[in-house]
Image (cartoon, rainbow, N blue to C red):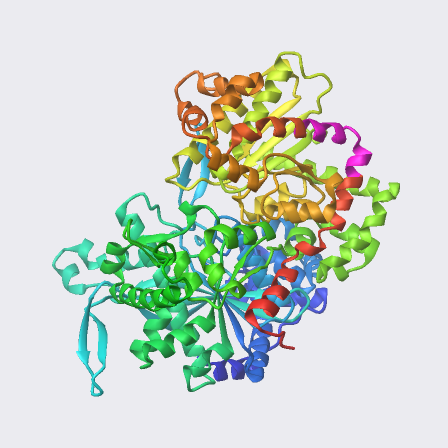
Amino acid sequence: MDQTANQAAAATAPAIDLSSVEAIKDQLRSFMVHSVGVDPDFASQRDWLYALAQLVRGRLSEEYLATARAQYDADARRVYYLSMEYLTGRSLLKHLYDLGVHDRVAEALKDMGQSLEAIQEFEYDAALGNGGLGRLAACYLDSMATHGYPGFGYGIRYEFGMFTQRVEGGQQVEHPETWLRYGNPWEFERPNVIYPVRFRGRLTHFKNETGETVTQWVDTTDVIAMAYDVPVPGYGSGKVVKLRLWSARATRDFDLRYFNEGNYIDAVKDKTISENLSKVLYPMDTTLMGQELRLMQEYFFVSASLQDIIARHHRKHASLDTLPEKVTIQLNDTHPSLAVPELMRLLIDHYDYDFQKAWDLTREVFNYTNHTLLPEALETWPIAMLEAVLPRHLDLIYKINFDFLQQVKYAFPGQPDVLSRMSLIDDAGRRVRMAHLCVVGSRRVNGVAALHTDLMRAHVFADFNRMEPDKFVNVTNGVTQRRWLLQANRPLADLITEAIGEGWKTDLSRLKDLEPLADDSAFRERFAAIKRANKQRFAGMVRDRTGFEIAPDMMFDTQIKRMHEYKRQLLNVLHVITLYNDLRNGRGGDRIPRAVTFGGKAAPGYFMAKLIIRLINDVAMVINHDRSIRDRLKVAFVPNYNVSAAEIIIPGTDLSEQISTAGTEASGTGNMKFALNGALTIGTLDGANIEIKNAVGDDNIFIFGKTADEVGDMRAGGYHPREYYDTNEALRNAVDMIAGGFFNADDPDRYLPIRDTLLSGGDHFFLMADYQSYIETQAQVEAVYADQDAWMRKAIVNVANMGGFSSDRSIHSYAKDIWRVQPVA
């Protein structure tokens, strides 16, 4: 059905009425019968979830069609957001809050003998992402919709997500994430929105009638991309952004000839191979086959998206010459980098543009967000693999590179080393540098925190910055307060609204009005009571998932994030072991009882990250069963950390661990979510920690460790981690206990690789150098926490100064400084 037919259908369909409890009850009964096909008197809670989701989705569909019509009529430039991840979590409660009907629906269900809280537990987290990259994308779509920006997201509909993490014998074990087992009640399947995506093949060349050489990509293996649309509503705005997810389909599902010959495997071989492209997020890339699958997955996603963007543009505009005036595309990290040569291919091969005109258009359409400073995380692809899988794109990359290097020669004459550094091709390793491709092919490149952007300009893209300094800008990341305060911490949200009104829900800077209330004893008391209730809920989750009991009277010290060496979960473990040694050796004194909780997934092929997870669990087993320390220290690893878990953990946390090596974390958004919910931060001067420190004040955050400049100087001048080990008894004892099998008598050598990476492997992330500062700062934390009144005062000051860390502010900055778009009424 085309857009006109959609509008006509919407005009004749009965409107969804959510205006009263009685209307909601009537429509729920109707949807239960007509959409779910179940008698309401015999419906299960999952049936109620699907009936309610269908009702809400109907309202969102009405709002989306009205939004799309307004944007179409306004002929507004539209933002297309390309991201491999969207970590949306559950959607039911978010949508009810966005529509302003949460309490009304809860009352209607109660009248019908049902519980909204119980029903929403049957919704799976959407398995469309893993970490901060995907959660940021979800926050940004929410903010675009809330403030009326014409946005549109593209991603992949992963059938099995990344994986479900279980802890078995202390180890991470990956299981399929079957989030689509019962279907996704929010999505609209679009079997009529399909595009061919081509792989492999070969190039042929011929002269056209004007004598120009034309390249054709022939004998390709094709896959079909089919769309699924998910509505993303704004809060109270009546606007809805669409998230379009691609699912891979074979061009030929079933070969009857093979089947009739008894060859049942080959009969469905094409279907199986093709559909692997949308099975899992980030296929394991430790094998050549896994790397190739990941490359194909990234191209599948961008090719379908760009074909769709062009088709949408052509609905109102005959020529692609106006593409930069009506389209702006944001590349969220390097995963969508192949969009640059893909747009070139479409313009040249399908729409007869010459190379220069196509390149001029392309560079005006794309913008690129860089999310990492780690060299190993800057994506590159082997030339041989690109030549085999995407020969036309490699051909275009060579041409783009040749054209670009001519400009570099002009800008930096007689400097071949600069040419080598800026080339899209790493000739030494025979690889294509995808981040370079994004920079060269984009109008604007942004970092995601002030320090990150400074380091990006000074180091990672220093030569590019010298050549085009205006191209590089900063947009500090943000989080949506609707998800991370209004929904995740309703009691605190209600207290804030009672104190300062509702304006903060769409303008987080209003939180500043809370700051005087930090000195109001009655407000502090209510704030503390809410924190305690949230800690009880958090403790219940830890008990249910790990079997360990943690008491709400303890300080809840939390580190939840993707498992990676630069995030330094291992430094946290060293502190835990040091605390344990003090307690069991009678040096604990009046230490504050502390519960240290970890959560996060390790990539399946990341040996060291998985080993650290096992260490955490081994340490937890020993400490939690040691009666001599009298429950003054507890450790837990919460398996399968996701958005829904975060919504319980974050509001119940006292101390937020943001302890990455300075200069390695681009921004982080967990730090913002914790502070927004009244946790105090212990952290390094890294990423957005610096901006949080500037916002809340030095007295309301705990900063430790080397600065990025100091780390750089030490790395350049020669860093000797063993010197710290030799001269610090507490550190030496902790490392020796890990290496000597204290926590793993069954296999004493299990953690020798951890010792080796710290002592003989160079301690790349400077744990040894930062250890003593971390220990001393943790002691300061305990001293402040001992005075609960002072702690709550600092917590309220943190909440009050989070106004600058909303994704709304980020989106306004993108709209003004990068996208050049305006809200559409």
Q: Position of residue 523 (x, y in %)?
A: 84, 44
Tell whether position 790 is magenta: yes
Q: Say whether residue 642 is left or right of residue 109.
A: left
Against 507, is 150 above or below? Answer: below
For this view, does 269 lie left or right of residue 649? left
Above or below, 464 relative to 611: below
Residue 161 drawn at (x, y percent): 43, 51
Between 9 and 411, the one lying in front of the other is: 411
Quadrant including the C terminus: bottom right
Q: Position of residue 484 (x, y in %)?
A: 65, 51
Furthest toward the front, the residue is: 414
Which of these two is toward me, 515 or 427? 427
- The answer to which of 205 and 122 lies nearer the viewer is 205
Instruction: Locate the N terminus and report the quarter of the image it occupies.
Output: bottom left
Residue 495 lies left or right of residue 150; in this view the side is right
- Say which quarter of the image contains residue 220: bottom left
Q: Position of residue 405 (x, y in %)?
A: 35, 64
Residue at the limit of the structure toward the left, as seen here: 261
Tag count: 0
Residue at the image position 55 percent from the left and 77 percent from the top: 68
Asked whether residue 277 is in view, the answer is no
Q: Main secondary structure of the magenta part?
A: helix
Whether 35 is among the magenta residues is no
Quarter holding residue 421? bottom left
Give the image quarter of residue 222: bottom left
Q: Which residues are magenta?
A: 778-792
* The one of 711 and 586 positioned closer to us in this rendering: 711
Q: Is residue 377 visible to the viewer in this orientation of the structure?
A: yes
Above or below residue 28? Residue 615 is above
